[in-house]
Image (cartoon, rainbow, N blue to C red):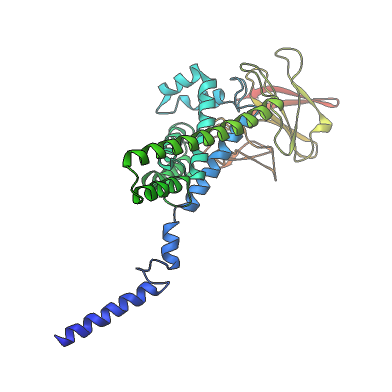
Amino acid sequence: MADMADVDTVAARGMRRRDRSPFGDGGQTGWRAGAARHAMLPLRLFLGATFVYAGIDKLADAHYLGGAADPASFVAQTRAVRGASPIGPLLDQALHNPTPFALAMAFGELAVGLGALLGFWTRLAALGGVLINLSLWLTVSWQVHPYYLGNDLPFMMAWVPLLLGGAPRLSVDAVLARRSARERAAGTPSGTVRRRALIDGGVAAVAVAGTGLLAGSLAARLGRKNGTPAAGTVTTPPAASGGTSAQPPAGAGSAPSVAVADVQVGGAVKTTDPATGDAVYVLQPQQGQYTALSAVCPHAQCVVNAPRDGKLVCPCHNSVFDAATGAREAGPATTGLARYGITRSGDRLQLGRRQD
C-alpha cells in the first residue's frame, strides 16, 4: 500500500510540473494554451478584411453596375456564366433585376466582412460568407478545372470553423457574453439579462450597419465620380495599369482607331469592339509589330489586365495569355484570346473584324 501511495504521489507531482510548464499539454497559462485559444483569430481577421475589401471594391468600381455592353459589369459577368452554372435558373432572377442583386452582393460582402472583423454575430456573418462563396463557386468558379484552382470553394470551407465556433475572444460577441455572465453572477434576473443583451446587440448592430452603409455609399459615390457607365450603354472602360484608353468613334458602328504614337512597345491601348461592346487591346509587342486582341478572358469573361512582361493575365482566375498572339499559356481558360484585324493608315491604327 505504501508503494502505491508513493507512485500516486510521484504521478501527482509530475502532473503539477506539467501544468506549470509552458510546454505542458495540460497547462492553462502556457503559450500553447494561449495560442489555442486564439487559433481562429488570424483566419477571422483575414476573411473579414478580404470581404470588406471585396465589397468596397465592387461599389467603387465604375463598371460594376454598368450595362450588358460593359464586359466588367455584374450583368455581363452573370450572363457569361449562366449557361454553364448548375444554378442557371436562379441567375435568371438576378438578370431580371440586376441592380438590386448587384448591390445586395456588394453590401452583403461588406456586412459579412465587418461582422467577422469585429466578431459581432460571428456565426451569422460566417453563414453569410458560406452562402456568398457557395454562390460564387456554383457560378464563377464552376468551370475551373481542377477544382482547387478556383478560390471560392476554399473560401467557403474557411468560413466553416467560424460558423461552428464563433468568436469567443477579442470580439464584440465576447464582450457582450462576459457582461451577461457578470450580471447573472450578481443575481440579476435572467429575463433582465436577456433584455439588456438584446438592447446591447441591437445598438451594436445599428453601429455596424451604419458603418457599412457609410463606407459603401462613399465607395459608390467615388465610383460614380470616376464615370460609372449607365445601364445598357456602350462605353470604353478606363485602361488598366500599363495601357491607355482610346475613345470609340462618333459614328455608330464605325471601326474605332487609335493613334500609333499612343501604342508603346510592350504596352497597349484599350478600345471597344463596336459590334459587341467587348473591350479590345491594341498592342505593339515588338517595334513596328501591331496586333489587336480581345481583352475578355474566354474562361469566365473577365477583362484581362494590361500587358506586362509580354503576358496578359486574367485577374479572376489567373489565366495567362501571350501578348503577341493571344495564345493561352496557363490557367483554367481552354482557348486563347480572340484576335482582331488591324490596319495602319498614316498615324492611325484601325480596328478590323474579329477573327474567330
Q: Is residue 127 left or right of residue 280?
A: left
Give the left or right position of residue 49, taking residue 257 as reference: left
Q: How many marks?
A: 0
Above or below, comparing residue 28 to residue 306 in the picture: below
Horizontal side, residue 88 vs residue 104: left or right = left
User: What residue is at 44 percent from the left and 32 percent from the top?
Assistant: 135
Q: Is residue 336 visible?
A: no
- Residue with the most extreme bottom position: 2
Q: Which residue is at a point 40% across and 41% down the rendered structure image?
A: 123
Q: Could you tell me residue 206's position as x and y percent?
A: 51, 33
User: Residue 302 is drawn in which quadrant?
Assistant: top right
Q: Residue at x 78, y 40 (%)?
A: 265
Expressed as whole percent of the image width and height from the top left, the position of residue 299 reads 53, 33
Using the image as rendered, state which of residue 94 and residue 151 is in the foreground: 94
Camera-side residue of 89 and 304: 89
Q: Quadrant of residue 49?
A: top right
Which quarter of the rendering shows the C terminus?
top right
Q: Residue at x 69, y 27 (%)?
A: 237
